[in-house]
Amino acid sequence: MTADIVELPKRRRNQADTRPLTTLKIKNHKSGFLSDAHPYKGLRVRANKNGTKTWMYRYRVGDKLKQIKLGTYPGMELSEAREAFLAQRKLREQHEDPRQVAQQKIEETRQRARENNKKIFTFSVMVEQYLTERVEKDRKPKGAKEVRRLLENDLGNLADLPIIQVEPEDLHNHIKTISKRAPDVARVFRAELSRAWRYAINTGRTQAACSINTDTGGKLTQGKRERHLKTDELKLLLSWLPNYSRTVEDILTLTLYLGLRSGEVCKLQDEWLKEESDGWWLTIPASEMKKNHSDHKVPLVGNALRIAQRRSGRGIWFPSRAGGPVKQKILGVEVYAHSGRSRAKIYKRYRVCPVLNWAPNDLRKTARSHLANLGCPFEVAESILHHMIPGVAGLYNQHKYGDEKREWLQVWADHLDNLVSDNVVYMTKDGGK
């Protein structure tokens, strides 16, 4: 009798293993997924190409199949993965999406971190972000450097103070203290600190409303210097100029004789100098001038021409040790050093200039005022200073006044030379300085 042969069903290779996961099975797993069995159905472990294994919880929301990462093996063992799985499955039983719950927790954590950061968001941090992200990217290097120096030097006790803790009275008193020393510095400081604060608000660094306004620190309008040297003061200064360094003396002399801005004189160079049929001329490019509406053509006469001939031939007429032309700032520093106003020990040995309370730019106003006193026509004097003639007259009058500028700068140079001669005679009769 032939026995009945019963053929057992063969297990397909791709059929999922319904047996529970074990630590050994997970350890030996090399690729693909392994799924756990009841009561942990939905827990899976995925083998990654880098050798690690990731625990996943796979679940369904409506018609969509989703999964969420629980941890990484071997950092998370099988028992820990099952506990995490049960916690996530409980959320599903409560009709919540574990991924959404996890995302909400992440957002809450981030929000708490942002709030903590805002609590310690100090003025020094705010200023540094403003300087590096805005000022040093948008402004020219010289201006950006000055803003950094100003804010860092005068931030003082505000530096470590959180933005949200500052009181308007603190800001008012801080800026008022600066104004007692230097009103214009306080005005610029207030404006830049206000911009830094608004930048922090706009970039989401703080929600604290800016407490700085036009009343903070009191009235801080920029004072307009109306100082110019009168004839007696000019006599004293012209004779006293050699007490400055030769570089500063020559720059101040050219500023006075030509009516140029001292910053423009600092940048003079050989390629701007040219001899034409009627004499020597300087042509300062518009790009190198403070008011760059056009090139400025300057005739050289008298003492200004002598300085130009002595200085030319070296490329830059007033080179600095660091390379490039000297900075305009050195003029103000040296004039201040000889003013007698500083209490610094380093300046005590400096001789004091007999002309008090003046700045290098006052020489330009001095030239303009004395030209008017000598009878120089308005349009010619304004052309010498490279001012645009205002209104409709400036629009219609396109004459460059080249000959007239040479004529009146010669008159001005002769006038200054006569003042020096008169002063030498006066001083000799009095027995010298």
Image (spheres, grey):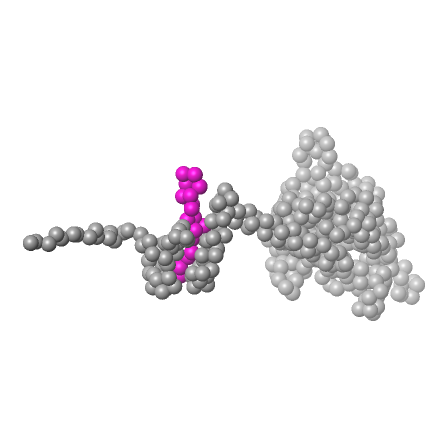
Q: Position of residue 88 (x, y in %)?
A: 48, 50
Please give left or right for residue 82 compared with residue 332 in the image: left
Q: For residue 53: magenta? A: yes
Residue placed farthest to the right in the image? 430
**Is 395 above or below relative to 432?**
above
Corner quadrant of residue 149: bottom right
Residue at the image point whose x is 73% and y is 45% from the top: 210
Q: Nearer the viewer, residue 115 or 32?
A: 32
Q: Nearer the viewer, residue 17 or 162?
A: 17
Look at the image and tell me whether residue 18 can be seen. Answer: yes
Q: Quadrant of the N terminus?
A: bottom left
Please give left or right for residue 99 compared with residue 370 in the image: left
Stretch of the chain drawn in magenta: 52-68
Q: Nearer the viewer, residue 38 or 203?
A: 38
Residue at the image point whose x is 80% and y is 63% from the top: 337
Look at the image and tell me whether residue 297 can be seen. Answer: no
Q: Quadrant of the C terminus?
A: bottom right
Q: Main secondary structure of the magenta part?
A: strand
Q: Nearer the viewer, residue 192 or 129?
A: 129
Q: Position of residue 138 (x, y in %)?
A: 61, 48
